[in-house]
């Protein structure tokens, strides 16, 4: 029997609807903060100012960019020092939370995160910084937000396509946790409930973007997926996306949406526990893989790496890059030919097929 | 939509089999401790000494008693001071862990817990102290063990009856989390997987107490239940048991075993989400309550409060004591007559019946 080591992280999470402003005020008081540096991209500045009306803001940092370039990290740290901030408050998606984490990493300041997408970064101690085209990733409890204030109504303006890809990114956190290097019964249980929430609520968002109850259920799924991911680590799916995203600057959430079913198709037959979890979560005891594809067909996310801008002539190099990152713990050994085939199918947007079946 | 607030707690948990000694040594090193106060009841002293062979022990505190009387708390704190301990290491069941918590509460010393029953106290920040026959209970992050080392082989000598009652106590942590005051999707998800593990593994222990894989699965269920309980708080079941256990000094785990199905019978029809969770966990979509009773009939736990020593003439007073503690958030309003009826059935060991059905 293998040893299982599980680390849980201390965090306070508030799920509300239409209550971000008052919840943020209460939590800032609870943290005893009196000099808040708000981090919000320009597009979300008005929203952030609205949410922060009742708290002591010393400055707003707006120069947020994807993947947290080193110069952005320097700038946000300088802003925190200059304004003598005692709390970092991020309002935004994964890049915004990531910018706050970059500041927390060196300053040790606490973060209060108010997510506006389903990125999930707010519930993990994982940070990332990009320098010279290379993204460094690390884990540090200091960067885990002390408090997260989720407000389902903040997602109402998220466009359908981004809601879907961001939600499928959250789904990928859940699914990959079932075969990630530190997969364990605790993370797996959270992931099952995460998939259940997301699979139930995402189609309702496609039907009606104003469905607050569905938005809220997606937030639960997002949080569960992020905690599962933090506990289990990066599995094959995240390695593939990390490599492709880093090397070719592909749209983050859409990339995850495209890749996930192909990786599931490759792994599922070799991972009976994961198959059981997926079956439970999708309420499809007989054929959970088809149930996953059915969900995709209802959500109509982007389905090819070609449409995300990956040049076809890069597929061989991409395969080599990915092969160097395949986790030893993946439930099946993956050959270079299999990975090249997988990336080819994902590039063309072929229907994902369980590899075992495709090979016959 | 109600607001949901969830607090997670930071803790490192190691699940192994036959590796307690080396895992404890590695974790003591990881914590940087050099003066370890071991807390172990006399009956487990030999085991504790064996586990602690490779670590710097300054003393062993053996005066452990149930419910942590105030004088025991004083004595263990004095021992920690006297020996200038920098780590509390508990080896034992809930009373032993509770004794370490009493010391951590005032000294702030970290705890490394090595459980030998399925009590679950090691995974909660809840402490309890008894003075003048009254048990005070509180929550403090300081008392949550920093590290838990679970070793399934330590449970091999646990007698079948205590394995069953202690396992059902863990099951009660899970089930009560579905309707406890702070019930939430995260705790509920953990509880579903906890019930699944316990329901699968407990009958295997009854068949073969040496089944290490089953012992290990029970530990997962124990941990999941304790984390769910810590997140959701005490529901009706725990209030009933807390009152009866405190007032009449009834055997802790057996008491939980007896009471649980009666409370489930009372609440389930009024708690559709809990019913769905129980159905999922017991893989019984149609009639999860009968599935729970089937599980009980396979485990043959004690089934009456009478055999635990509660005098019949105390049932009216017990009802009054319990009624003062019924959570406002219970899924159904409970009348005094209903509670008297429930306690009467539990006292006699009647088959627990869903109240709605019994009333017809």
Image: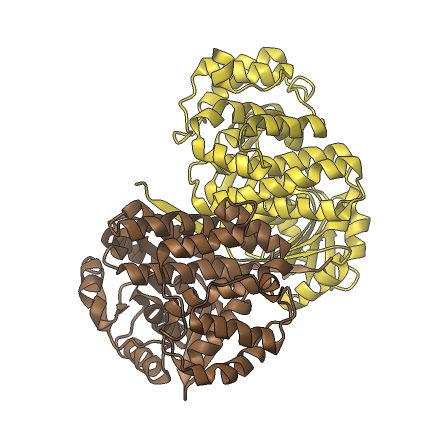
Chain colours: A brown, B yellow
Residue at the (49%, 63%) spot, across then down: A352
Judged left or right of residue B40, residue A245 is left
The percent coordinates of residue A240 (x first, y second) are 50, 73
* Nearest to the observer: residue A117 or residue B171: A117
Task: Tell me if I can see residue A21 in this picture.
Answer: yes
Task: Tell me if I can see residue B81 in this picture.
Answer: no
The percent coordinates of residue A286 (x first, y second) are 57, 46
The percent coordinates of residue B293 (x first, y second) are 62, 26
Instruction: For the C terminus of chain A, give its image quadrant.
Output: bottom right
Residue at the (50%, 74%) spot, across then down: A343
Residue B295 placement: quadrant: top right
Residue at the (40%, 22%) spot, across then down: B333
Residue B306 placement: quadrant: top right
Q: In the displayed structure, would residue A20 be above or below residue B307?
A: below
Please state the total of marks drawn on the protein image. Answer: 0
Instruction: For the N terminus of chain A, give its image quadrant.
Output: bottom right
Judged left or right of residue B2, residue B204 is right
The percent coordinates of residue A67 (x first, y second) are 37, 77
Looking at this view, name the residue that lies furthest to the front: A360
Judged left or right of residue B67, residue A170 is left
* Nearest to the observer: residue B357 or residue B122: B357
Q: In the displayed structure, would residue A353 be above or below residue A210?
A: below
């Amino acid at each position: 029997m293998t040893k299982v080591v599980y680390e849980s992280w201390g965090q306070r999470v508030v799920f509300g609807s239409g209550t971000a402003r008052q919840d943020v005020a209460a939590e800032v008081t609870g943290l005893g903060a009196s000099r808040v540096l708000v981090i919000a991209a320009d597009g979300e500045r008005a929203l952030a100012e609205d949410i922060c009306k009742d708290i002591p803001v010393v400055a707003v940092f707006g120069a947020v960019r994807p993947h947290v370039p080193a110069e952005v990290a320097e700038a946000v740290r300088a802003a925190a020092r200059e304004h003598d901030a005692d709390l970092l408050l991020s309002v935004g998606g994964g890049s915004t939370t990531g910018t706050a984490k970059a500041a927390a990493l060196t300053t040790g300041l606490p973060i209060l995160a108010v997510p506006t997408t389903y990125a999930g970064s707010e519930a993990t101690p994982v940070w990332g910084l990009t320098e010279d085209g290379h993204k460094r990733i690390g884990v540090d409890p200091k960067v885990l937000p002390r408090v997260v204030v989720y407000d389902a109504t903040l997602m109402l303006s998220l466009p359908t396509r981004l809601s879907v890809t961001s939600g499928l990114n959250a789904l990928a956190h859940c699914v990959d946790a079932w075969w990630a290097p530190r997969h364990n019964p605790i993370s797996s249980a959270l992931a099952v409930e995460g998939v259940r929430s997301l699979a139930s609520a995402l189609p309702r968002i496609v039907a009606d973007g104003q469905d607050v109850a569905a938005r809220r259920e997606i937030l639960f799924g997002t949080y569960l997926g992020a905690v599962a991911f933090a506990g289990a680590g990066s599995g094959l799916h995240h390695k593939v996306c990390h490599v492709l995203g880093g090397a070719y600057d592909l749209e983050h959430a859409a990339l995850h949406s495209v890749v996930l079913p192909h990786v599931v198709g490759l792994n599922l037959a070799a991972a009976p526990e994961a198959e059981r979890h997926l079956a439970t979560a999708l309420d499809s005891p007989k054929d959970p893989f088809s149930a996953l594809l059915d969900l995709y067909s209802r959500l109509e996310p982007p389905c090819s790496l070609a449409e995300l801008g990956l040049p076809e002539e890069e597929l061989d190099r991409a395969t080599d890059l990915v092969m160097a990152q395949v986790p030893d713990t993946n439930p099946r050994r993956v050959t270079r030919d299999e990975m090249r085939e997988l990336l080819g199918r994902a590039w063309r947007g072929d229907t994902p097929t369980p590899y075992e079946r495709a090979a016959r």
